[in-house]
Amino acid sequence: MEQQRKNKEFIINYLTAVGGVGKTRELLEKYITDEALISHIEVFETAFPKYDLFIDEMTAEGNRIIIKARVNGTHLGDLGGISPTYKKVDFPVIVAYEIENEKIISHWMLADQMSLMEQLGVIPEAAH
């Protein structure tokens, strides 16, 4: 239980450190060894500079932390061929982190890409 509490605190500290600031490789490597996650963040940072990730829920099990969160940012750079729209976005994600020695060593992520594309105006908003 003590390690789970420490892992939760680590994730909160990590998200606080990278939230609302430029996410440089140097900053990311203080918290992450998972190259796939670093690459994903670098791509997303290009499209949504200084984006934030806000935790709605967090669960710990062993050396894994799972968060349900919201991504907040403004589309100011290219995103997979989508030119900047200058629109603000706020969409849900679920991220599972595996932590060892106070570093994120692997992750799994699910983002509501439909909501993101609707907010960018790439696809029409679905009727609810």
Image: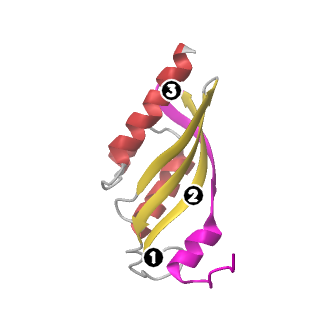
Residue 42, image quadrant:
bottom left
Magenta stretch, residue numbers: 100-128
Which residue position is annotated with label 3? 7
Q: Position of residue 45 (x, y in %)?
A: 41, 61
- Name the kind of residue labelled 3 in the image: Asn
Q: Position of residue 11 (x, y in %)?
A: 46, 35
The C terminus lies in quadrant: bottom right
Q: Do the residues labelled 3 and 2 touch (CB within 8 Å)?
A: no
Q: Earlier in the sequence, mark 2 or mark 1?
A: 1
Q: Which residue lies furthest to the front in this view?
A: 128
Dot 3: element:
helix
Which residue position is annotated with label 2? 92
Mark 2 closeness class: few <14, some 14–19, many ≥20 residues within 10 Å? some
Which disc is residue 12 wearing?
Answer: none
Q: Please determine whether, in this image, residue 104 is positioned above or below residue 22.
A: above
Q: Please determine whether, in this image, residue 1 is positioned above or below residue 108.
A: above
Which residue position is annotated with label 1? 78
Q: Which of marks 3 and 2 is nearer the N terminus?
A: 3
- Name the kind of residue labelled 2 in the image: Pro
- Name the kind of residue labelled 1 in the image: Asp
Mark 3 closeness class: few <14, some 14–19, many ≥20 residues within 10 Å? many
Q: Position of residue 28 (x, y in %)?
A: 40, 44
